[in-house]
Image (cartoon, rainbow, N blue to C red):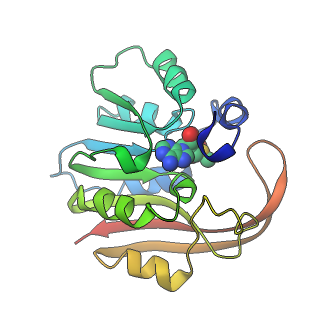
């Protein structure tokens, strides 16, 4: 059984050799030097961003509901002393205090009924001056009728970020290829925000 009926295995195969996402690299640069190097990776997938964080000597709590994702990540990391892998749905996780959260195309797959609680506890775990970066889906996305996913308008995203200074909030709309080769209409927000 896969999370919310998506076949993630195909996605992991297609993405496991890609570079860390741009929003991740950009967001990470905004973490001030005085904060502890402790990060949460939300829905880590093939683990590319987790591996980069470990290379940079961060302590990482890496969360994904799929055991296969955890197997891939374990096989890719020789020294796991700074890595805590949590195989769980977001809503069942107690997020650790951290200085950086990356959620790359992962939070939209959270059930709408639990998303507010997940967002609240995830963002509470970020220290003052810490960074959130990642994507949320917009209301025009081709998957908008999937009742197991969450979608937001720009004002709703701004409201979600009320406890942050917004560094980047870019909106993307249009037909584009997906990681596994198909094409769909995408509507998402690229977000970098600094916690008050
Ligand atoms: C589109 S992939 C993104 C993976 C990676 N962050 C990236 O940018 O390539 C979404 C990931 O989130 C995980 N996921 C989806 N819904 C989840 C949930 N409710 N709880 C935990 N993980 C979830 C999936 O298993 C999948 O690995």
> Which quarter of the rendering shows the N terminus?
top right
Mark yes or no: residue 43 visible.
Answer: no
Quadrant assignment for the C terminus: bottom left
Seen as rendered, the residue at the extreme right is 182
Residue in the image at 37% along x and 54% along y: 29
Relative height, residue 30 to residue 53 (above, below): below
Nearest the viewer among 53 and 88 is: 88
Q: Quadrant of residue 139?
A: bottom right
Task: Name the residue at the bottom extreme.
Answer: 155
**Is residue 104 positioned above or below 142 on the image?**
above
> Which image quadrant shows ligand 1?
top right
Is 116 left, or right, of 150 in this rendering? left
Residue 63 versus residue 48: which sits nearer the camera?
63
Which quadrant would residue 119 be assigned to in this image?
bottom left
Q: Is residue 171 left or right of residue 145?
A: left
| Residue 35 point in image, percent of width and height | 17, 51
């Amino acid at each position: 059984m896969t999370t919310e009926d998506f076949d993630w295995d195909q996605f992991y195969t297609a993405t496991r050799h890609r570079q860390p996402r741009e929003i991740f690299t950009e967001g990470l640069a905004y973490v001030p030097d005085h904060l502890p190097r402790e990060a949460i990776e939300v829905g880590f997938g093939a683990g590319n961003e987790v591996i980069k964080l470990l290379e940079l000597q961060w302590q990482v709590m890496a969360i994904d509901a799929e055991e296969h994702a955890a197997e891939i990540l374990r096989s890719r990391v020789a020294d796991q002393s700074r890595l805590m892998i949590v195989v769980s749905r977001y809503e069942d996780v107690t997020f650790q205090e951290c200085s950086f959260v990356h959620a790359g195309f992962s939070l939209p797959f959270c059930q709408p009924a639990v998303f507010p609680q997940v967002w609240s506890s995830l963002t509470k775990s970020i220290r003052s001056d810490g960074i959130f970066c990642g994507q949320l889906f917009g209301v025009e996305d081709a998957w908008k009728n999937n009742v197991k996913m969450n979608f937001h308008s720009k004002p709703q995203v701004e409201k979600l970020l009320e406890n942050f200074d917004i560094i980047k909030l870019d909106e993307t709309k249009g037909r584009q290829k997906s990681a596994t080769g198909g094409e769909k209409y995408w509507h998402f927000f690229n977000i970098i925000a600094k916690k008050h």
